Image: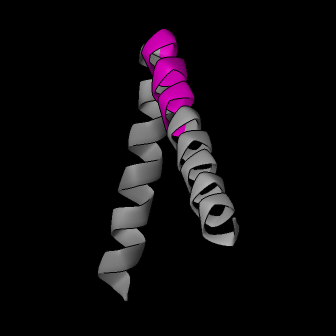
Amino acid sequence: MQVKKVITYVAVAFVVFYLFTRPAQAADAVNGVINSIFQGADQLALFFTRITT
């Protein structure tokens, strides 16, 4: 349980460090993740649309 907590703190510290040292790249990474989520949702919607028609 202790290892999980340490890994979580290290990950949060890395994200904060990345945001402050490379804000443009961090914004690009977030945009990429968001775009991927939307593309996945669109593909699922297309899948279910084709199943029902």
Q: As rendered, which of 15 and 49 lies closer to the eye?
A: 49
In the displayed structure, 9 sits above or below 25; it is below
Question: Residue at horizontal 43%, vertical 30%?
Answer: 17
Q: Start and end of the magenta stretch?
A: 23-33
Q: Does the segment drawn in magenta span residue 17?
A: no
Q: Position of residue 41 (x, y in %)?
A: 62, 52
Dominant secondary structure of the residues highlighted in magenta in the image: helix
Number of marks present in the image shown:
0
Question: Residue at horizontal 47%, vertical 49%?
Answer: 12
Q: Quadrant of residue 49?
A: bottom right
In the displayed structure, 46 sits above or below 14; it is below
* Location of the C terminus (image quadrant): bottom right
**Left or right of 44 on screen, residue 15:** left
Q: Position of residue 50 (x, y in %)?
A: 61, 60
Which residue extends farthest top?
24
* Location of the N terminus (image quadrant): bottom left
